[in-house]
Amino acid sequence: MMVTNQKRMAAQILSKKEGRVVGVHRVWVHPDYLDEVTSAVQKDDIRQLIEDGIIKARPITGISRSRARKVATQKAKGRRKGQGSRKGTANARAPKKERWMRIIRSQRRVLKAFREDETITSSRYRYYYRKAKGGSYRSIADMKRNMELDGISFGGEQ
């Protein structure tokens, strides 16, 4: 049974009814009433069939985000980062420059705090600042260790 014209007319009517485009492929015709649908030639007949529920518009099927959310939670935990998932080089994924910036900024922040609370003098600050800039210290802990070797004591550590 050919119902292409009826589906086309139904798509036009349903589009106006829904307020958004209903394509021909979204039009559903009840399989038990195909004879009635084929005999419907005018738009009024199609409108009547829509009212009776013989012709309907299928709902729009969206793309589920549940899988994407699951992957995102796993990535937040640090999963899915193995060899097979990597595209760029190690430097592209975590650039050396950014790593350096993170380390040097934290070291300079600590040095400034030491200068402000007078743990170190301004001349000593310049000395450690230059050493930090030269890359002498791996971390804040390493910097503090070296400062302790030079005879600088930090309050609150027993």
Image: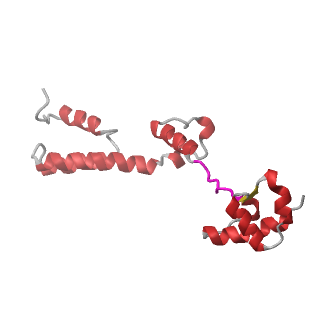
**What residue is drawn where x is 53% and y is 49%?**
92
Residue 90: percent from the left, percent from the top? Answer: 54, 43
Determine the residue positioned at 20% across, 51% down: 126
Residue 44 seen in the figure: yes
Going by the image, does 110 lie left or right of 86? left
Q: Quadrant of residue 22?
A: bottom right
Relative side of 50 to 154, left or right: right
Q: Is residue 57 magenta?
A: yes
Q: Is residue 30 left or right of residue 133?
A: right
Does residue 147 sit above or below 123 in this rendering?
A: above
Q: Position of residue 39 (x, y in %)?
A: 86, 65
Q: Position of residue 83 (x, y in %)?
A: 60, 36
The residue lying at 11 percent from left, 42 percent from top is: 119
Viewer-side residue, 46 vs 86: 46
Q: Is residue 66 above or below residue 2?
A: above
Q: Residue furthest top?
A: 158
- Using the rendered image of the protein, determine whether residue 134 is visible from the camera's viewpoint: no
**Label total for image:** 0
Check if residue 140 falls in the magenta segment.
no
Establish if 141 lies above or below 13: above
- Stretch in magenta: 56-64
Relative to 24, residue 150 above or below: above
| Foreground residue among 6 and 59 | 6
Which residue is at the front of the view, 4 or 97?
A: 4
The image position of residue 103, as x and y in percent, is: 34, 45
Provide the major secondary structure of the magenta segment.
loop
Quadrant of the frame with the C terminus:
top left
Decide which of 10, 64 is in the foreground and name it: 10
Q: Quadrant of the N terminus?
A: bottom right
Q: What residue appears at the point 62 percent right and 53 percent down from the top-left corner? A: 62
